[in-house]
Image (tube, helix red, strand yellow):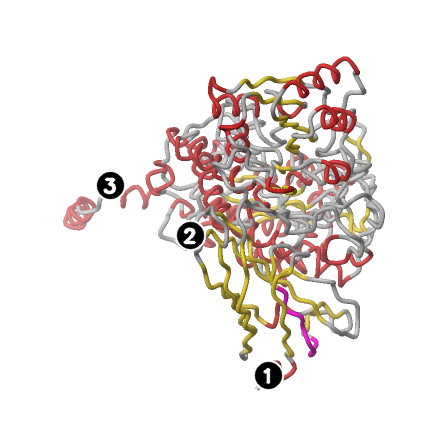
Amino acid sequence: MRHWIIAGAIACATLTSSQLLAQSQPAFRNTKLPVEDRITDLIGKLTLEEKAQQLNHTNKGLPRLNLPAWGGWNQTLHGVWSKQPTTLFPIATAMGATWDPDLIHTVAVAMSDEGRALYNAKAEGPRTTHGLVFRSPVINISRDPRWGRVQEVFSEDPYLTGRMAVAYVRGLQGDDISHLKLAATVKHFAVNNVETGRQHLSATVDERNLFEYWLPHWRDAIMEAHAQSVMSSYNAINGTPDAVNHYLLTDILRGKWHFDGFVTDDLGAVELLSSTRHNEVGQRFSEDPVYSAAMAIKAGNDSDDPEFETNLPLAVQRGMLTEKEIDRALRNVLRVGFRLGAFDPPEDSPYSKIGMDVVRSPEHLKLSDQLGAESMTLLLNRQNFLPLDKAKIKSVAVIGPAGGDDYETGNYYGTPYRKVSVTRGLESLLGNKVKVEYEKGTGYIDSLDQKAIDRAVELARKSDIVVLCLGTNLKVEAEGRDRRNLDLPGAQEQLLEAVYAANPKTVLVLENAGPLAVTWANDHLPAILGAWYPGEGAGDTIARTLFGDNNPSGHLPYTVYQSLDGVPPQNEYDVSKGYTYMYFKGLPLYPFGHGLSYTSFSYSGLKVARSAAGLTVSFAIKNVGERAGADVAQLYTHQRSSSTYQPIKSLRAFERVLLKPGETKLISFEVPYSHLAFYDVKIHDFRVEPGTFDILIGSSSEDIRLRSEANISEAIRAAKK
């Protein structure tokens, strides 16, 4: 026996300290084991109450097993929302206006670095200590121009939204699904597009619209980018609340798309199934909150607020739910936690070394400025009024509520560290040789104050140039607040017309989220620049753009209508009734994809080749102007004849192309035949209908430069062989 003891001691002496530690720890701490085995071990160590507690996304961790609070309530829509300053980027709609997924990926990487740094530093977020699950991006779709949350989304088009969503999610999470930097929560799933009554409304959506318009970008975010979390929305679809919608959360999300992350509900959505909260009326799903919680778990809603922690044990006790069903939901949640390394030693993760020096680093501030510059969208430029010439201007009047220090930067972000107004940006750019003065004229939503407008008019009259900064703020369009019309709010239209009458050399700078029907301005003013809700360096970016140091290259990610005439009511979810560039039959003020430049581009040499897999569309684009600049080459298709209705146009591919003066670039787009499919309700799936497709290449959905056609009947037969 003594020999065995000595031999054992010698054997132990040869083990490293980390190996000895691994032997003494539970299996869920063993990083060498498969993740599913580690999850099984951890679940087996938890009581029913502890399991329910772990399904509360704001839980404080579990000291008994030394489990950290790793999820949290975190946001990084256009910069990490924190109690300390972080880099403020332009809003998501501005991201969409860049048509530059590579840039959006880089921006998301920067935001994820700041998010990891704040987690490593145990910094305080808006509601919890910073965790690793971020409730971003918002990938709903801006079907309706009145929607209050247009500022949070990328586009009205599912294809463009999908490309941006994939870029954003990959940037936020990192490239290794097994070792995540952060976890992205794509929201709000699904058909969430109205603020008025959003907690209790039911969207009536037919099967074709659901799969063809409302879901493709979600599929991309899940199947291509592997988003780790999905947020179910408040609304119902065809009478079934999304938080308890098994068809949506299980049949589609997990069955069709093989999602293996976790679903969480929008804040308080499960609670609102059976109660009111802060005078908000919910879905009236059940009078029993315990039953509502049980049905949410059964449907595939894995995570919630404190309601799960309170009600799930009661549901098991009452026989409404089995502990096995809770284990399934918990496995989905913990899988993401293990991929994030939340239960592993910090030194095992390369992300644990990200320090606070990345937060608001010079590189990130420069990136915010780049995003702002690429998003600048030149809507109108009569007789090349822009860019302005510094040598010919001695005085500039900045007028309007968006021209001062309190310009709007958008929601889901904390307090900005700095905000550079248009006034300050022009002062910095032009220096002491040019006099820059500011008059507000009116507030965003204020009624007419004639004395304030008179002061603005007097300043306009005595100045060489007027930069008129108008738009909206969160009192006009925001979460919980839809617009009733597309007009400039308050007295801004009166200010616009009075200032122009005093000085026709007026440039309108629009700082807004949703589309504004500035028809009078379009008919009268020489130039209009769309600047969105810009980032912290807004004024510098706008000033450089107005004076030509930055050549605008943004393109509209949505349609700007002349009015609401011809636009369906908000409760019409069938887009074929007239929504978006795909189905709107009227003449828009500015079409989807529109954006001008200080240079010009020519398109030539269109070729369309067919293969067994799809179409190859190639052409050349040349900068024929005298300035370097970027255009967004866009490929649309139209099916000429069909057994059912088809869109007027559908975006199939795009590329942002930066060219020097005189430079030419060959563009080639690959369009799989599957991208030409429509959803056939007879077979409950997508199919390509043989026939002739128009191939349209242009700089917007209306500015078509090249046309061809492709008959895909023979190609489909070849593909089947």
Rendered view: 281 above or below 703: above
> SS for tag 1?
helix
* Residue 504 percent across, percent down from the top left: 69, 30
* Extreme residue in the top direction: 451
Assess disc 1: are there few (<14), some (14-19) or many (≥20) residues with their C-alpha within 10 Å of its C-alpha.
few
> SS for tag 3?
helix
Rendered view: 644 above or below 142: below
Asked if residue 670 lies in the magenta stretch, the reply is no
* Residue 270 percent across, percent down from the top left: 72, 40
Assess disc 3: are there few (<14), some (14-19) or many (≥20) residues with their C-alpha within 10 Å of its C-alpha.
few
Q: Which amino acid type is shown beneath numbered disc 1?
A: Lys
Identify the residue position indicated by label 2 in the image: 176
**Residue 720 marker:** 1
Name the front one of labels 2 and 1: 1
Direction from residue 634 to residue 215 in the image, left or right: right
Which callout, 1 or 3, points at the residue further toward the start of the chain? Answer: 3
Q: Are marks 3 and 2 in contact (CB under 8 Å)?
A: no
Camera sees residue 243: no
The secondary structure making up most of the magenta span is strand
The residue lying at 60 percent from left, 81 percent from top is 715
Identify the residue position indicated by label 3 in the image: 17
Assess disc 2: are there few (<14), some (14-19) or many (≥20) residues with their C-alpha within 10 Å of its C-alpha.
few
Which callout, 3 or 2, points at the residue further toward the start of the chain? Answer: 3
Q: Which residues are magenta?
A: 689-696
The residue lying at 59 percent from left, 58 percent from top is 634
Q: Are marks 1 and 3 in contact (CB under 8 Å)?
A: no
* Extreme residue in the front direction: 392
Quadrant housing the C terminus? bottom right
Asked if residue 694 lies in the magenta stretch, the reply is yes
